[in-house]
């Protein structure tokens, strides 16, 4: 019964709460619009039929979060040294291809977020038929090191997390 009215109750609650937080000060009209959004948008999501994707390995997820946190701090330091001119050698930026075995779209989305939020790297393009990722790296020294890092640290764990 409740699923007929609210097919995605957490989404509805999140929409309602977010709408009210963004409407400062809250009026009766804001509450009405938040309620309408909370009741209609989950029905649109039901029509889109998003895939259900569960996390298979919570331990791998925690390891991934730890790796990403350390790598973001390390990358921030490396990019800062490049920008401030403290590195003596010439910086070489460039594009490279990374062959991926990961095909789960949620896993690919998480990998895109990781790579784009890490300073000095940018997810440029993904070719689904070949599984090749085009990546831009600010300080590209050795392509194979980047491939090993992405496949060994991130992709391996994402393959465990997403079925």
Image (spheres, grey):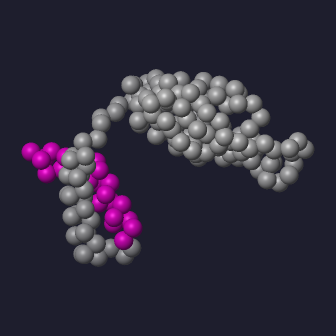
The residue positioned 71% from the left and 42% from the top of the image is 94
- In the drawing, does residue 111 fall left or right of residue 19? right
The residue positioned farthest toward the right in the image shown: 88
The residue positioned 55% from the left and 35% from the top of the image is 133
The residue positioned 13% from the left and 51% from the top of the image is 5
| Quadrant assignment, res 145 | top right
- In the drawing, does residue 22 fall left or right of residue 76? left
Q: Position of residue 147 (x, y in %)?
A: 64, 28
The image quadrant where one finds the N terminus is: top left
- In the drawing, does residue 145 fall left or right of residue 125? right
The residue positioned farthest toward the left in the image shown: 1
The image quadrant where one finds the C terminus is: top left
Residue 18 located within the stretch drawn in magenta: yes
Q: Position of residue 105 (x, y in %)?
A: 41, 35
Residues rendered magenta in the picture = 1-23
Taking depth in this image into account, of 53 and 24 the one nearest to the observer is 53
Q: How many marks?
A: 0
Q: Mark yes or no: residue 70 visible.
A: no
Q: Position of residue 142 (x, y in %)?
A: 75, 30
Q: Position of residue 148 (x, y in %)?
A: 65, 25
Taking depth in this image into account, of 109 and 96 the one nearest to the observer is 96
Q: Mark yes or no: residue 117 visible.
A: yes
Residue 133 located within the stretch drawn in magenta: no
- In the drawing, does residue 147 fall left or right of residue 41? right
Q: Main secondary structure of the magenta part?
A: helix
The residue positioned 34% from the left and 33% from the top of the image is 53
């Amino acid at each position: 019964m409740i699923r007929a009215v609210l097919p995605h109750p957490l989404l509805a609650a999140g929409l309602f709460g977010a709408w009210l937080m963004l409407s400062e000060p809250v009026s009766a009209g804001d509450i009405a619009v938040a309620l309408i959004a909370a009741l209609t948008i989950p029905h649109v999501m039901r029509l889109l039929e998003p895939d259900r994707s569960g996390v298979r390995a919570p331990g791998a997820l925690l390891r991934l979060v730890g790796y990403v946190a350390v790598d973001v701090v390390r990358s921030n330091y490396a990019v800062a040294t490049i920008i401030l001119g403290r590195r003596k050698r010439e910086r070489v930026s460039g594009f490279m291809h990374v062959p991926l075995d990961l095909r789960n779209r949620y896993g690919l989305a998480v990998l895109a977020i990781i790579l784009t939020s890490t300073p000095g790297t940018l997810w440029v393009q993904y070719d689904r038929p070949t599984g090749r990722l085009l990546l831009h790296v600010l300080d590209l020294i050795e392509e194979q090191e980047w491939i090993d890092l992405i496949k060994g640290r991130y992709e391996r764990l994402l393959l465990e997390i997403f079925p």
